[in-house]
Amino acid sequence: MNKEQQIKIFLNTNEKLAKLLESKGNDYADTDRLINFKTLQKLCETLQVDVKTLEGVHMYYILLKIQRICNLTFNNKTAMNESTADSIDDLINYCHLMKCSLIEKAGSSENLDITD
């Protein structure tokens, strides 16, 4: 790869990333483009979510999806990259995955009301 090819790839990638940043940013925020990070940090702190644990990582992703659904639902936004229904499906899957992790951690399904 020569210098010109490298620069072309770099510029094309940055152009795509700028469009994605603009589009996804509109799904998640308005004026303060970092508001979701700030809000999620406060949520994790308030709920004492420890992201150094497996359960904490699961909860982080669950809260992230809830936050996205709230943004789309209560701020009258039209999703540009992932529909509200897709976000709800993701949330359901994240909850299922957390349940699987808790079952695996417990070593059985007895305490989680799981039937064969």
Image (cartoon, rainbow, N blue to C red):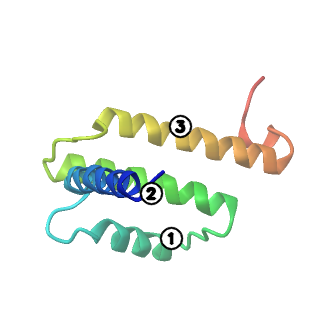
Against 31, residue 78 (above or below) is above
Camera-side residue: 79 or 72? 79
Q: Are marks 2 and 1 in contact (CB under 8 Å)?
A: yes
* Residue displayed at 34% across by 70% down: 39
At x 75%, y 26%, the residue is 115
* Relative horizontal placement of residue 40, taking residue 56 as reference (left or right): left
At label 1, the amino acid type is Leu
Q: Amino acid at mark 3?
A: Asn
Asked whether disc 1 touches disc 3, contact meaning CB atoms under 8 Å apart, the reply is no
Q: Is 114 rendered above or below residue 78?
A: above
- Disc 2 marks which amino acid? Leu
Q: Are marks 2 and 3 in contact (CB under 8 Å)?
A: no
Q: CA distance from mark 1 to mark 3?
A: 21 Å
Name the spot of residue 21 as percent of width and height, x first.
27, 56
Q: CA distance from mark 2 to mark 3?
A: 13 Å
Disc 1 or disc 3, which is closer to the eye?
Answer: 3
Where's residue 72, x and y in %? 23, 47
Q: Label for residue 63? A: 2
The mark nearer the N terminus, 1 or 3, is 1
Question: What numbered label is drawn on residue 47?
Answer: 1
Sooner in the amino-acid sequence: mark 2 or mark 3: 2
Q: Earlier in the sequence, mark 2 or mark 1?
A: 1
Outermost residue toward the front in this view: 2
In the rendered image, which residue does mark 3 sit on?
93
